[in-house]
């Protein structure tokens, strides 16, 4: 009898199979089956909705906490469809023994981040269960999409440029360092990306695809986007930004930053004519100073393909993360 294992929560191949064979199979409809970060649905205007759950350990970490993280994760999912985030709900599941002072800090952090992101928390729920002091948060986010905006994974076109908004692996390395009691100066990048995304749209950049780099890391994100758009991507390893401290951390533990998650970085695939302007906008925005172009959509491809040009000039095929991407980062 098959059972749920930790790998099912990795954001990699096992997660995708679980979603397809159970959730998509049961709930199948044209909106859900697009498998985007947020669903754009008809209404008085185009409405984007998303939902997420946050179970990270530890609850507080260098640069953030689960309260800030849950707002950033929810808001960024809406932004990846070109939506302006407006409203959130939050459900708290509190294990018996959770510290009230800790809960108050997390809620205050959540409120401060919501103000930064321009969203209102308009409804919520609290449940207390038996346990050992854990705190878990479920959120739903709602945003408004302009009628002339159509950003989705299937929209990448040959010739498009592939941009990332900053260094890879910061959040993943922060959580792993905290859990292993490794002392370093790495801090989480968890951040709401409103400014850079909304500026791209307001200034008329032809943005075809947006995706935040979370579980599964950049490698998984690029492969999923290539598959959705039926294109081949080529990216250069030497252009992928990784901070010196994260690079050293990865070298120490034998990790690949290509498969390490972030919570405040995005991939933008834009028309080649807009590459320079898009980079300028992202770099001027808060949280985007290290933005770079890492590659190009080079060809049509029936099943989607990602080629990584390595340090020594070879080409390596990039696939979706397989196995469990330790630790759980959100």
Image: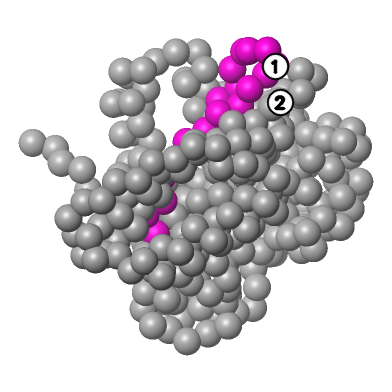
Residue 52 sits inside the magenta stretch: yes
**Residue 214 drawn at (x, y percent):** 53, 51
Q: Which residue is mark 1?
A: 45
Residue at x 14% of width, y 37% of height? 2
What colour-coding does the image apply?
one colour
**Residue 132 drawn at (x, y percent):** 21, 65
**Residue 329 drawn at (x, y percent):** 44, 59
50 vs 115, nearest the viewer: 115
166 vs 247, nearest the viewer: 166
- Check if mark 1's residue and mark 2's residue have beta carbons within 8 Å: yes
97 vs 279, nearest the viewer: 97
* Position of the C terminus by quadrant: bottom left
Which segment did they paint magenta? 39-56
| Relative to 79, 205 lies left or right | right
Q: Which numbered tag is attached to residue 18?
A: none
The earlier-in-sequence mark between 1 and 2 is 1
Query: Is residue 132 positioned above or below 243 on the image?
Result: above
Q: Give the class, few, some or many, for how many residues have Cα within 10 Å of label 1's Cα (few <14, many ≥20).
A: few
Q: Main secondary structure of the magenta part?
A: strand
Question: Which structural element holds mark 2?
Answer: strand
Q: Which residue is mark 2?
A: 145
Residue 259 sits inside the magenta stretch: no
Residue at x 64% of width, y 78% of height? 244
294 vs 16, nearest the viewer: 16
Residue 44 in which image quadrant: top right
Residue 310 visible to an observer of this rendering = no
């Amino acid at each position: 009898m098959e059972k749920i294992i930790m790998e099912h929560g990795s954001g990699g191949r096992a997660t995708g199979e679980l979603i397809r064979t159970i959730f998509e199979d049961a709930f199948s409809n044209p909106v859900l089956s697009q498998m985007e970060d947020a669903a754009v649905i008809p209404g008085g205007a185009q409405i984007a909705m998303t939902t997420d759950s946050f179970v990270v350990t530890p609850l507080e970490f260098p640069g953030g906490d689960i309260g800030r993280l849950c707002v950033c994760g929810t808001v960024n999912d809406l932004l990846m469809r070109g939506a302006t985030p407006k409203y959130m709900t939050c459900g708290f599941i509190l294990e018996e023994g959770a510290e009230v002072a800790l809960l108050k800090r997390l809620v205050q952090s959540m409120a401060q981040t919501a103000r930064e992101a321009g969203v209102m928390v308009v409804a919520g729920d609290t449940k207390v269960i038996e346990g050992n002091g854990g705190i878990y948060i479920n959120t739903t986010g709602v945003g408004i999409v302009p009628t002339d905006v159509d950003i989705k994974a299937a929209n990448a076109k040959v010739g498009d440029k592939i941009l990332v908004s900053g260094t890879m692996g910061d959040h993943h390395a922060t959580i792993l360092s905290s859990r292993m009691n490794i002392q370093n100066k790495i801090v989480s990048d968890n951040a709401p990306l409103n400014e850079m995304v909304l500026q791209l749209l307001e200034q008329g950049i032809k943005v075809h695809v947006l995706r935040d780099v979370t579980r599964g890391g950049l490698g998984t994100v690029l492969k999923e986007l290539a598959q959705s758009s039926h294109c081949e991507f080529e990216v250069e390893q030497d252009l992928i930004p990784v901070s010196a401290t994260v690079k050293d951390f990865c070298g120490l533990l034998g990790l690949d930053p290509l498969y390490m998650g972030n919570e405040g970085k995005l991939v933008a695939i834009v028309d080649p004519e807009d590459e320079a302007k898009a980079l300028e906008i992202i770099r001027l925005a808060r949280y985007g100073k290290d933005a770079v172009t890492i590659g190009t959509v080079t060809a049509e491809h029936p099943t989607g393909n990602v080629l990584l040009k390595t340090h020594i000039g070879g080409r390596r095929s990039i696939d979706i993360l397989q196995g469990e991407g330790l630790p759980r980062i959100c």
